[in-house]
Image: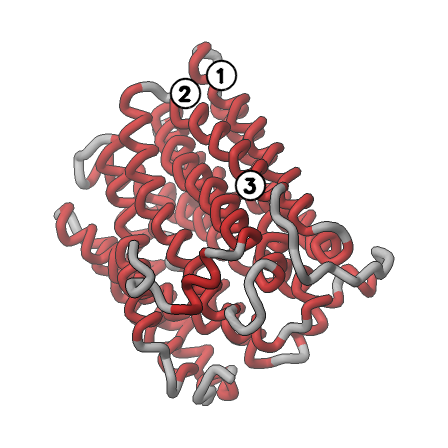
Amino acid sequence: MSSTTLSAPTQALFRHPPFIFFIFGRGFSSLAYQIGAVASGWQIYALTHSAFQLGLIGLAQFIPMAGFTFLAGHAADRYSRNRVVQLCQIVEGLAALFLAWGSFAGWIRPVHIFAAVTVLGAARSFESPAMSALLPGVVPEGLIQKGTALMSGVFQTTAIAGPALGGFIYAFSPGLPYAIMAAMWLLGGIFSGAIRTWRPVANKEPPTFRSLFAGVGFVRHNPTILGTISLDLFAVLLGGATALLPIYARDILHTGPWGLGILRGAPAIGALVMTLLIARRPISRRVGMRMFQAVIVFGLATLVFALSRSMALSLAALAIMGASDVVSVVIRLSLVQLATPDDMRGRVGAVNFLFINASNQLGEFESGITAALFGAMPAAAIGGIGTVLVALLWMKLFPTLRDVEKLE
């Protein structure tokens, strides 16, 4: 690629070794996680044919996250962040090896999958806040927004490739996706361990009750940030239709593991397109209202997906869900990044991580429960309608968020 193709800031980032190591460490870890989401979901449903047990995957991930998140945030602010990330990725690789062994040997049962998923949830509760807090230390001064955009692009790319790759590989052998996941997490650990930050962590505050929950106090006293992350919590909690994709793929759209992979990748395609659009034309005004509008579009697209029996229409609805979600994510991350001092980034990131994963993992559990009670299509439709209603309610409850004009 010629030097004229990339802007000067982008060239500076790609010549900065800590950022390169960070991108590879994050990319391998994210790709492994996306592959595992397809493999574990399809395998659980193939073994049990139970929407309830499919929803339990989300609960198994959320419980350790809820238990460890605040301790993880403090660890990210006190210890070497790249070492925390590296250790977590090694643990995740070992959990994937366990699933590969059980699948190849033929003795794996749902209880083994739930146990491994619980370990993965615990590891991710430490990895994600440390990774988020690490970003400002691996980019040159003044390039945090460009670094964040590139990191988001890498994440969306893995979210497209991972599900499709996972579904394709699973069709050959249920154990093969887990073996590949293990290799990717171990590679990610090598790159994360090689990171050398130029902005060291200075906070050595002991883990008191007050310090552990300092991030909660920070968020609670900032109504704009509180409204932003709580909106994401309840909107995605209700709109967690993606948890039901194995049911839609197998019983409604009548496709196989490869089809499930394509369905899981569709939101990421929409998200990547929107990321590129925002990178070219940033959201410059009425950002609060734009976020609420995006959440409403997300809910309406969820409703369309819920009622669709066409593969093409389902893919389009999922892509729109991914695109609208990116708008909310960009605004939320920008607000948090701009408002948080470096020595608090781990703990505030932990609060944000807890809200995000509460919405994702508990949303999967909620979708599994409602699907078991009412069926998959009514459950997804209820979620879409609920998301729209939450957005309208939050516009009234958080007027300061609704009236945010610019990201400054």
Compare residues 311 and 392 and report the one nearer the observer: 311
Residue 235 in view (yes/no): no
**Amino acid on which the number 3 mark rests in the picture:** Phe
Q: CA distance from mark 2 to mark 3?
A: 25 Å
Compare residues 12 and 158 and report the one nearer the observer: 12
Mark 1 vs mark 3: give the one in front: 3
What x and y, as percent, mark residue 269? 27, 54
Q: CA distance from mark 1 to mark 3?
A: 28 Å
Residue at 49 percent of width and 41 percent of height: 29
Choose the circle earlier in sequence order: 2 or 3.
2
Residue 74 in view (yes/no): yes
| Contact (Cβ within 8 Å) of mark 2 with mark 1 | yes
* Residue on which disc 2 sits: 175
* Residue on which disc 3 sits: 191
Residue at 32 percent of width and 26 percent of height: 170
**Residue 336 sits above or below residue 261 on the image:** below
Left-right relation of 385 to 351:
left
- Label 1: how many Cα within 10 Å (few below 14, some 14–19, many 20+): some
**Residue 65 sits above or below residue 258 on the image:** below
Mark 1 secondary-structure assignment: helix
